[in-house]
Amino acid sequence: MEGHHLILGKLIDAVTGRVLPDTHDERYRQKLARLLMDARGYSQADIQSRCSLRVKAGDNCAMVKVDMAVTVADRICMIIKYGPGSLVTRHRPALAASRLLAPYQIPVVVVTNGEDADILDGHTGEVIANGLEHIPARPELAARCAVFLFPPIAEARAEIESRIMYAYEVDGSCPCDDSICILP
C-alpha cells in the first residue's frame, strides 16, 4: 500500500506514457484522458496531466495537483479536477484552481468523479452542462476560447483563491494523501 490507495499493479499513462501505480483513482483519470483523446479530439500535446499548483494560506504553503489542463492555441482553456464522491463539494476548489493555474481566468472547469461530471463556466462558476458526454470537444472549446477575453487575475483575488484551495485541498486532506506536498 502506498498512501491510502490500494495499489493494483502498474499502468501506462495515456497522456505521458509513464508507468504509474494502478489505483482505482488512476483508472478513472486514465478513462478521462482516453475520453479526451478518443472521443473529444484532443491530442496528447493538448493535455498536461498532474499539474503542480503552489497554494498558500498565510505562512502555510503546499503543492497540490490539478489532474488535467487542456491547452488550445497556446492557452489553458479547460481544467479537469477529479475526485471520488460528490461533485458539488469540489466546485469551489476547482474554480479556485482555474484562477491560479494561469495568470488569467481559465474559461472551462470540469469537476468529475469519473462517472459523472459538472462542467462549469470558470468566470461565473455556473454549471453549464452535466455529464461526461458534455465535456467540450476540441472544436467546441476552441470556438469558446476564441471569443473569451481571458481576464487577468488580480493579485488580491489570487491570494483569496489560494487560501480557498489550501483550505479545501490541504487542510481538508487525508493525512496519508501522498499527492499533496506541504512546503516549509
Image (cartoon, grey):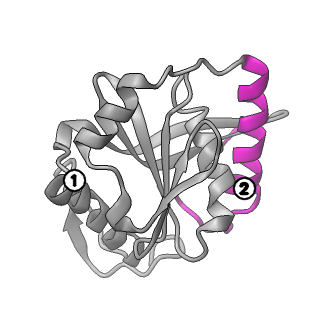
Task: Tell whether 21 sits left or right of 125.
Answer: left
- For the residues carrying marks 2 and 1, which lies nearer the camera in this image? 1
Task: Name the element at disc 2.
Answer: helix
Query: Given the image, on which type of amino acid does mark 1 rest?
Result: Arg
Check whether the beta carbons of the residues at disc 2 and disc 1 lie within 8 A of each other. Answer: no
Q: Is residue 181 visible?
A: no
Q: Mark 1 points at which residue?
A: 40
Task: Specify the quadrant that holds the N terminus.
Answer: bottom left
Residue 110: % across, % down: 47, 54
Residue 167 counted in the magenta span: yes
For marks 2 and 1, the one nearer the N-term is 1
Report how far apart the C-alphas of labels 2 and 1 lie in the structure.
30 Å
Q: Which quarter of the picture shows residue 163?
A: top right
| Viewer-nearest residue: 132 or 1 | 132
**Label 1 secondary element:** loop
Query: Which stretch appears magenta?
Result: 155-184
For badge 2, the amino acid type reads Tyr
* Disc 2: which residue: 168
Instruction: Identify which residue is drawn at 53% across, 60% down.
Output: 178
Q: Residue drawn 68% across and 65% down?
A: 89
Identity of the residue drawn at 31% across and 32% down: 143
Describe residue 34's horizontal placement relative to residue 67 as left or right.
left
Q: Quadrant of residue 4?
A: bottom right
Is 6 drawn above or below residue 2 in the view shown? below
